[in-house]
Image (cartoon, rainbow, N blue to C red):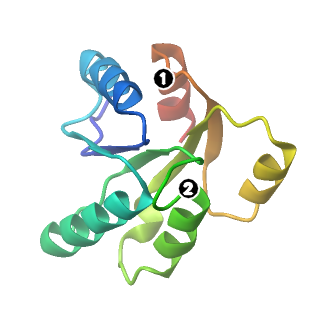
Amino acid sequence: MTKINSILLVDDDQINNFINKRIINKLGIADEVKTALNGEEALNYIQQHCQNTGQCPELIFLDINMPVMNGFEFLNEFDSLPLNNKDEVKIIVLTTSTNPGDLQKLKDYRIKGFLNKPLTEKKIWEAINQY
């Protein structure tokens, strides 16, 4: 299997980010795993990293409910970014939300799917194999 160049974990829960990063590193599927605590931090990282190196994260695990900038706001802003390789970024929503409105609203965005928390090795492999 070819390694993913970069995975970005976007979640306001530092413990979730820590655990998810450890799981991904243990699996050895990515050269780099970065974290952001909200959508604004994630956008700043993407703008700086993608514009400076030309390589965006290949995979983003995105939480919906976060302070500062939530997942929906992130998705709106991400879609408007002027990046050449934006279509290569796969976004998977990782959430505890069971709100039918949230799940319906996600259909309006360019995401590959959504997973319920917690992230597990099995869920990661399924996402990697599917997308």
Q: Residue furthest front?
A: 67
Q: Secondary structure at mark 1?
A: helix
* Viewer-proximal residue among 35 and 26: 35
Q: Is residue 116 left or right of residue 92?
A: right
* Residue 109 x, y percent position in the rendering: 67, 63
Q: Amino acid at mark 2?
A: Gly
Of the numbered discs in the image, which one, if any, rests on residue 71?
2
Q: Name the N-terminal-most of marks 1 and 2.
A: 2
* Viewer-proximal residue among 129 and 119: 119
For the image, the number of numbered tags is 2
Q: Is residue 20 above or below residue 83?
A: above
* Residue 108 x, y percent position in the rendering: 74, 65
Of the numbered discs in the image, which one, if any, rests on residue 20?
none
* Viewer-proximal residue among 93 and 37: 37
* Viewer-proximal residue among 47 and 86: 47
Give neighbour class at mark 2: few <14, some 14-19, many 20+ (Cα, 10 Å): many
Please tell me whether mark 1 or mark 2 is closer to you in this view: 2
* Residue 90 x, y percent position in the rendering: 48, 52
The residue pinned by badge 1 equals: 125
Q: Is residue 32 left or right of residue 59?
A: left
Q: Residue furthest left?
A: 52
* Residue 8 x, y percent position in the rendering: 34, 46
Give neighbour class at mark 1: few <14, some 14-19, many 20+ (Cα, 10 Å): some
Residue drawn 65% across the image and 31% down it: 96
Q: Secondary structure at mark 2?
A: helix
Q: Amino acid at mark 1?
A: Trp
Residue drawn 43% across the image and 58% down it: 39
Marks 1 and 2 in Cβ contact (< 8 Å) = no
Residue 27, quarter of the rendered image: top left
| CA distance separating discs 1 and 2 | 23 Å
Q: Is residue 64 above or below residue 48?
A: above
Quadrant occupied by the N terminus: top left
